[in-house]
């Protein structure tokens, strides 16, 4: 492209130089009719050269500027649908082979646009979801024949995945009776339990004085 522009500039300079020669000669020819005949022949020859250079310059400019392309029109085909000049990508035309690995990020996917039917079974595990943190609720102290509950809440910016609960000392007679995610507070896990008053040990020995224990809720949160 630089070579073509250079030839165009050279041709333009030659045209200007010839014009500088032709104009004075034309004036001199009008003033001196005695020498008009040889100068007229020379003038005609120069005019022909100027004309040829002008035509060559125009042809060169066309090559530099390139052909003038018209706006496409009509129905689209192949991987496109609709009509030109504004066709659309045909449904199903873009598959895994057309997408560069790592080129699609979270910002490119519409929120809530992917459902279970869009995922291959067992294709998503812990590594794809992100880090999971364990959050424990404040312990609830209970004595024999007492009952109560504990709640663990995921921190802001995380999502509750599930939860559970446990007794701190695993006291005999202690049981967890309820373990669920309540409506309020949201993004939390709640457990409820009690310590029985009378129970028998596995060997049949009656045990009525149960030690106190602490019930602790646990929530698993996706960061």
Image (cartoon, rainbow, N blue to C red):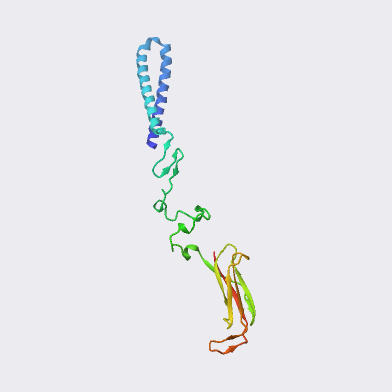
Task: Kindly identify the residue that appears in the image at 41 percent across and 16 percent down.
Answer: 26
Q: Nearer the viewer, residue 187 or 131?
A: 187
Number of marks in picture = 0
User: Where does the N terminus fall, quadrant-wise?
Assistant: top left
- Left/right placement of residue 204 relative to residue 12 reads right
Task: Kindly identify the residue that appears in the image at 59 percent across and 82 percent down.
Answer: 173
Q: Position of residue 92 (x, y in %)?
A: 42, 49
Q: Position of residue 199 (x, y in %)?
A: 59, 85
Q: Nearer the viewer, residue 160 or 128?
A: 160
Task: Kindly identify the residue that appears in the image at 54 percent across and 68 percent down.
Answer: 162
- Left/right placement of residue 104 relative to residue 173 reads left
- Left/right placement of residue 106 relative to residue 145 reads left
Confirm whether residue 168 shows in the render.
Answer: no
Q: Position of residue 88 (x, y in %)?
A: 45, 43
Relative vertical location of residue 167 with respect to residue 1 in this rendering, above or below:
below
Give the quarter of the image for residue 81.
top left
Q: Nearer the viewer, residue 11 or 18?
A: 11
Relative vertical location of residue 103 with respect to residue 11 in this rendering, above or below:
below
Q: Position of residue 10 (x, y in %)?
A: 39, 30
Relative vertical location of residue 13 with respect to residue 102 in this rendering, above or below:
above
């Amino acid at each position: 492209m630089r070579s073509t522009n250079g030839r165009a500039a050279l041709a333009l300079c030659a045209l200007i130089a010839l014009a500088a020669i032709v104009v004075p000669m034309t004036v001199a020819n009008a003033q001196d009719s005695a020498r008009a005949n040889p100068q007229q022949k020379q003038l005609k020859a120069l005019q022909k050269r100027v004309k040829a250079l002008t035509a060559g310059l125009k042809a060169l400019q066309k090559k530099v500027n390139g052909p003038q392309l018209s706006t496409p029109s009509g129905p689209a085909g192949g991987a496109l649908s609709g009509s030109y000049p504004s066709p659309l990508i045909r449904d199903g035309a873009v598959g895994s082979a057309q997408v560069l690995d790592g080129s699609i990020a979270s910002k490119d996917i519409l929120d809530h646009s992917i459902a279970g039917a869009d995922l291959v079974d067992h294709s998503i595990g812990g590594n794809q979801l992100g880090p999971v943190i364990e959050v424990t609720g404040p312990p609830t102290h209970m004595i024999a024949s007492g009952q109560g509950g504990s709640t663990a809440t995921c921190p802001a910016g995380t999502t509750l995945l599930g939860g559970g609960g446990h007794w701190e000392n695993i006291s005999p007679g202690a049981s967890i009776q309820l373990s669920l995610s309540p409506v309020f507070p949201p993004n939390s896990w709640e457990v409820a339990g009690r310590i029985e008053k009378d129970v028998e040990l596995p060997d049949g020995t009656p045990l009525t004085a149960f030690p106190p224990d602490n019930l602790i809720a646990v929530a698993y949160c996706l960061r």
